[in-house]
Amino acid sequence: MASSLVIVYHRQPYEEHVVGGKTVLRENASPNGIVPALKGFIGQTDRASWVAWKKAAAGKPVRFERRITVDDSYGSYEVVRLPLTSDQIGQFYHITSKEALWPILNSFPSLYSTENCDWATFREVNRLFAEAACEEAAPGAVVWVHDYNLWLVPKFVREMRPDVRIAFFHHTPFPSPDVFNILPWRDEIVDSLLDCDVVGFHIPRYARNFISVVQSLRPLDEVDERPVPDELRATGSALSEPVTPVAIRSGGRRIQIDAFPIGTHAELIRNTVQQAERLAQVAQIRRDIPQEKIIVSIGRVDYAKGTREMLLAYERLLQRRPELHGKVKLLVTAVAAADGMRAYKKAQQSIEQLVGRINGHIGTLSWQPILLSTTPMPFADTLCHYRAADICWVTPLRDGLNLVAKEFIAAHVNESGVLVLSEFAGAAVELQDAVLVNPYSLVQMDAAIDRALDMPREEQRARMQRMDALIDRYDIGHWTRHVLELFKQLRASPVENRDAA
């Protein structure tokens, strides 16, 4: 039976664990993040399918079922596992996506490289994803494609199945034309995205950049715009936009443009941290870390996350304010990249060396300024550390959104705490009561952490309450309802021929 919604994302919608020599499928340990957010749509549609990759040995029969039915707390759905060889995964994901596309998306052209890229393999993998999606889609279904490494899927889907509606969502930033147009494959990428019925982004700035890229490469018949809602305007900050595009017409087709940031599961987070065992865990964290101020920074190893710049700012803080020695502790989780991700190795080495230098030069036998972990922390434990912390330091140099900031707010349940947030994180346009900072400015970084440490508790509580009300209103359920309404409109509208007059 074909599906009315086909989700196309490179990751499988569960975790695989080997128990007693057998592979067991379990729901993701964290209820937050892209996979759980997308799985929230499964129970909201008649029948859903999910297309993802699974590693397979080259030149040998596939040793797993390509298509399985999964029943979990989200509902019943089909999963199509696309067998990819190590070479295909390496070229498609580890090299082309991370060494060529990722630096451009995050506006780091100096780190861009196509030296080892095989675009033909990238294109072929995208075709395989599209083929699998088309086999699952019912007549008039919505095929929902996620993220930049599947940029070419819409073009193949449109050729194979002109009857379906195609939606695309970017979880990343989208750069300005002068950066995006560095890509030698820019025309192929843009043409594929113009085969979509809707192209989505987290915030208006990324939607605006996309339109500017299209206009630099293709003639547009029209661009429809509307004022940005007040809750996403953030006037005066780096990603502020007063007007956002909502639709364009190109080649005789209308493409809807959507800018709507994903929310967090605020209620679940609050309920979790207020459980008796979690409150006890928070109290234990405070006992284990006796310092007056606990600063937490949660993320993964990535030069775009700004961890190095944050550590340097922390080092300057301890040099400027020796009275803080022994009174502050920075907890850093920078999850190491998977094997094969060469683009991040240098960033990881830099982080580890900096932490060692700061602890060695400034710390004592009884006090280490930084506690670093490069392994992921279970979600409930992460929430307890958020709740125990006085400050959350989230200052990426570029970020599509950043759910860590929203998780920290929800975990504090309207209590005191300070969020230090980069202006270049998409969430900054919503969270205007955070201490917003330009992470490229040493002066601003220094002033931001000083302000966070010295902020009166009454001001902390007022700011957190306003941000908590916002993330509660625009939570994951709100985002889900918004997207479902979008899909309803898509299905109700006629499929337009791209070459129609």
Image: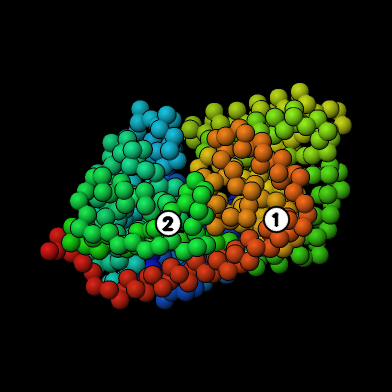
Is label 1 or label 2 in front?
Answer: 2
Q: Quadrant where the C terminus lies?
A: bottom left
Task: Answer yes or no: is residue 42 visible.
Answer: no
Residue sitting at x 52%, y 62%? 231
At 44% from the left and 34% from the top, the residue drawn is: 108
Seen from the viewer's position, the closer of residues 455 and 134 is 455
Residue 296 - label: none
| Circle 1: element type | helix
In the image, 476 versus 32, the foreground residue is 476
Taking the spot 38% from the left edge, 58% from the top edge, the residue there is 244
What kind of residue is marked 1? Answer: Leu
Q: Is residue 16 above or below residue 397?
A: below
**What x and y, as percent, mark residue 242?**
42, 56
Q: Disc 1 marks which residue?
A: 383
Q: Position of residue 324 (x, y in %)?
A: 81, 35
Q: Quadrant of residue 361?
A: top right
Q: Position of residue 240 (x, y in %)?
A: 47, 51
| Image position, residue 432 (x, y; %) | 58, 55
CA distance for labels 1 and 2: 34 Å
